[in-house]
Image (spheres, grey):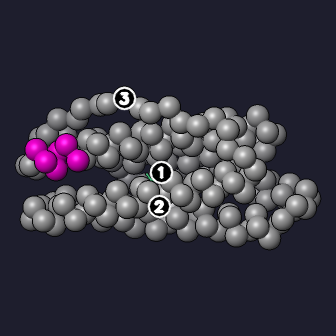
Amino acid sequence: MISTKVTDALNDHLNAELYSSYLYLSMSAYASHKGWRGAANWFFVQAQEEMIHVQKMYAYIEDQGARVILDEIAKPPSDFGTLLEVFEGVLEHERLVTARIRDLMTMALAENDHATETFLQWFVTEQTEEEKSSKEAIDRLKLAGDSGLAIFMMDNEFGTRTLNPPAV
Ligand code: FEO
């Protein structure tokens, strides 16, 4: 059993994860339009990962006997600039998600809600990984600079990303 306050906050975060998936799908479409086929794959896989985050949040709310309430999903941007700027947008977004998870954890601790605290631990670890992978892409794209060949090779590498779904 979780409190109404925690339920509302988790439902709100479920919506944020849906938006994350929507945002990365938009980035994937943008990358595809720009001819960055590898990056389009990378963002598509990221969109799928975000849906797994949604599923985890959904299942936890129901497991606690609470009710999932869905809300509108905000419209994502459709233009993202250079490939480097797209990944800078990813990192910026993930930092916002990390801050949201931190706030959720602070609330769970304040409410003495150990079950939710334990549940959120997975997201804390996941956010470290998400920030790391986008930061690595940014660092390497900065090294590539204006070299079309280097960006082409990096795009090929982004194309090798596959979905590794965790247990939900
Ligand atoms: Fe679900 Fe990328 O945070």
Name the residue rendered at 72%, 57% in the picture: 84
In-image side of 15 versus 80 (left or right):
left
Report the magenta residues as a range. 4-9
Residue 162 point in image, percent of width and height? 62, 51
Classify residue 12 by image quadrant.
top left
Residue at 51%, 61% (x, y): give it. 130
Whole-number angstrom distance, CA of label 2 to CA of label 3: 22 Å
2 or 3: tag closer to the N-terminus? 3
| Residue 167 spot, x, y in % from top left | 38, 53
Asked if residue 126 shows in the view, the reply is: no
Helix, strand or loop under label 2: helix
Q: How many residues crowd mark 3 within 10 Å: few (<14), some (14–19), many (20+)?
A: few
Q: CA distance from mark 1 to mark 2?
A: 22 Å
Q: Is residue 9 in view from this perspective?
A: yes
Left-right relation of 23 to 152: left
Which marked residue is nearer to the observer: mark 1 or mark 2? 2
Crowding around mark 1 (Cα neighbors within 10 Å: few <14, some 14 to 19, many 20+) is few
State the mark number for residue 72. 3
Identity of the amino acid at label 2? Arg
If you read the primary sequence from the N terminus, does the residue marked by circle 3 or circle 1 appear first?
A: 3
Residue 157: image quadrant is: bottom right
Q: Residue at x 33, y 59 (%)?
A: 101
Query: Does the magenta run of residues contain 118?
Result: no
Residue at 67% from the left image edge and 38% from the top image edge: 79
Q: Earlier in the sequence, mark 1 or mark 2?
A: 2
Label ID, residue 165: 1
With respect to residue 163, does 127 lie above or below? below
Can residue 7 be found in the magenta stretch?
yes
Which mark's residue is nearer the viewer, 3 or 1? 3
Label 2: few (<14), some (14–19) or many (≥20) C-alpha neighbours in 10 Å: some
Secondary element type, mark 3: loop
